[in-house]
């Protein structure tokens, strides 16, 4: 069976190290072994949590450019904006009609994101896992690489695929597999090792942006929270030390060394010594990405070409799926010319 990947990032702010190490790096490493790869900038999902839409256009450009700068080949993979393919919201409606509320009530991300104020949370935030199922199934994706925090939503997409197939009495959708990176799956905030690094955290010092220059990056690592203990000799010594564990995980991911090797290298040293090595490793790893990102952001024609190429392919696949879906729902076929 041909393999196809679909994944995406919300343009809700400045793209950060967590998005890169937890998602895009994994996409790049999978891309060559998969027949077709589609990477979406999920702008309609961004609207579920955006206080206003004023930065959406710039953030969308930033995410598209970051995909390429991080190593996605835009002439092999398809990069596109969700809102350029109307099939996502259309399929989501059909899925709404087969998804029990009980399934959505179990989604932990809604509880996290809505917080105590559930009555005022918008309907889009509550139902976004259904739109995410549509994003995936519209392209009949076989593999969905995501950070582990999104695993529950890919499992829901599998359940929705099954429910829809039952309703339509036809195996229209195959079940997509979540693919979670084994190392550094979750990058935590630099200010609080128990919270994930996030675009929407109010503190810029909680995250490393892919656009940060060397001085800003060094400052953020200097200010990163740690504890009073020295670096342990073995990995197990990092348990119950969330900030230390997070920084070690980041070092391991960008230096290519295992956490065990890193512990041996820095054993007994204070965090100040480790942080300076970590800064160098981060700069080495991120500087070429930042350079490429900046060049692409200045080249509107090239960015538009990439996004148009992606949307063209995505719309073809979307039309194929939707005509299959609609024919099995016995919707009245559109008269010719409409
Ligand atoms: N801290 C993280 N560690 C590992 N992976 C992460 N991802 C996000 N943050 C981390 C992964 O990046 C992909 C795209 O994320 P998204 O922007 O669509 O959604 P998100 O998880 O809500 O990302 P943010 O940065 O936390 O955004 P806001 O603050 O707007 O909610 C996903 O695969 C995700 O797992």
Image (cartoon, helix red, strand yellow):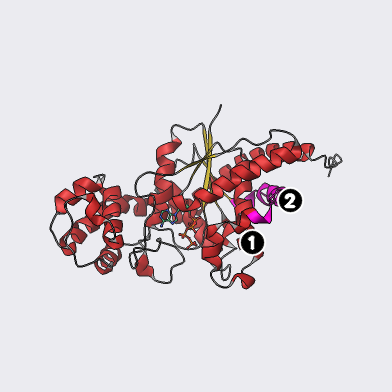
Helix, strand or loop: magenta stretch: helix
Q: Position of residue 193 (x, y in %)?
A: 34, 63
Q: What residue is drawn where x is 60% and y is 45%?
A: 157
How far apart marks 2 and 1 lie (CA) works out to: 15 Å
Q: Residues within 10 Å of mark 2 (few under 14, many from 20)?
A: few
Question: Which tag is nearer the camera, tag 2 or tag 1?
Answer: 2
Position of residue 198 relative to residue 67, above or below, is: below
Secondary structure beneath disc 2? loop
Residue 87 forms part of the magenta stretch = yes
Residue to which mark 1 is pinned: 124
Place of residue 120 in the rendered image (x, y in percent of width and height, measured from the top left) = 63, 72
- Could you tell which of marks 2 and 1 lies nearer the N-terminus? 2
Q: Is residue 150 visible?
A: yes
Label 1, residues with CA under 10 Å away: few <14, some 14-19, many ≥20: some
Residue pictured at 22% horizontal, 55% vertical = 237
The answer to which quarter of the image holds residue 1 is top right
Relative to 243, say whether 144 is above or below.
above
Image height of 110 relative to 130, above or below: below
Q: Is 81 covered by the magenta stretch?
A: no
- Residue located farthest toward the top when viewing the structure as drawn: 1
Specify start and end residues of the magenta stretch as a single range. Answer: 82-102
Where residue 194 appears, as percent x and y from the top left, is: 37, 63
Query: Residue 97 — which label?
Result: 2
Q: Is residue 300 left or right of residue 256?
A: right
Work out whether residue 315 or residue 122 is closer to the camera in this orientation and state it: 122
Dot 1 lies on which element?
Answer: helix
Q: Residue at x 35, y 53 (%)?
A: 291
Instruction: Indicate yes or no: mark 1 CB to ligand 1 under 8 Å.
Output: no
Q: Is mark 2 within 8 Å of ligand 1?
A: no
Q: Which mark is residue 18?
A: none
Residue 220 placement (x, y as % from top left): 29, 66
| Whether residue 304 is visible | no
């Amino acid at each position: 069976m041909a393999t196809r990947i679909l994944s995406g990032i919300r343009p809700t702010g400045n793209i950060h190290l967590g998005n890169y190490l937890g998602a895009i790096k994994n996409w790049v490493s999978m891309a060559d072994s998969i027949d077709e790869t589609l990477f979406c900038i999920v702008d309609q999902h961004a609207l579920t949590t955006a206080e206003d839409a004023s930065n959406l256009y710039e953030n969308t450009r930033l995410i598209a450019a970051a995909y390429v700068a991080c190593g996605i080949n835009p002439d092999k993979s398809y990069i596109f904006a969700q809102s350029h393919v109307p099939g996502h919201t259309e399929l989501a409606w059909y899925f709404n009609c087969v998804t029990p509320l009980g399934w959505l009530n179990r989604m932990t991300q809604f509880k996290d994101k809505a917080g105590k104020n559930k009555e005022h949370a918008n309907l889009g935030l509550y139902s976004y896992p259904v739109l995410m199922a549509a994003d995936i199934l519209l392209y009949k994706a076989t593999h969905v690489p995501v950070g582990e925090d999104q695993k529950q939503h890919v499992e829901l997409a599998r359940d929705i695929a099954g429910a829809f197939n039952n309703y339509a009495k036809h195996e229209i959708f195959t079940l997509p597999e979540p693919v979670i990176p084994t190392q550094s799956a979750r990058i935590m905030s630099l200010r609080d090792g128990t919270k994930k690094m996030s675009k929407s955290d109010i503190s810029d010092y909680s995250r490393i942006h892919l656009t940060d220059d060397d001085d800003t990056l060094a400052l953020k690592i200097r200010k990163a929270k740690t504890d009073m203990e020295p670096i342990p000799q073995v990995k197990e010594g990092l348990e119950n030390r969330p900030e230390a564990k997070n920084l070690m995980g980041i070092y391991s991911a960008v230096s290519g060394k295992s956490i065990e090797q890193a512990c041996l290298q820095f054993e007994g040293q204070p965090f100040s010594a480790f942080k300076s090595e970590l800064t160098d490793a981060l700069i080495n790893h991120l500087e070429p990405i930042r350079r490429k990102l900046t060049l692409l952001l200045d080249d509107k024609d090239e960015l538009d070409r990439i996004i148009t190429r992606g949307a063209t392919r995505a719309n073809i696949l979307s039309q194929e799926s939707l005509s299959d879906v609609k024919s099995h729902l016995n919707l009245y076929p559109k008269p010719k010319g409409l």
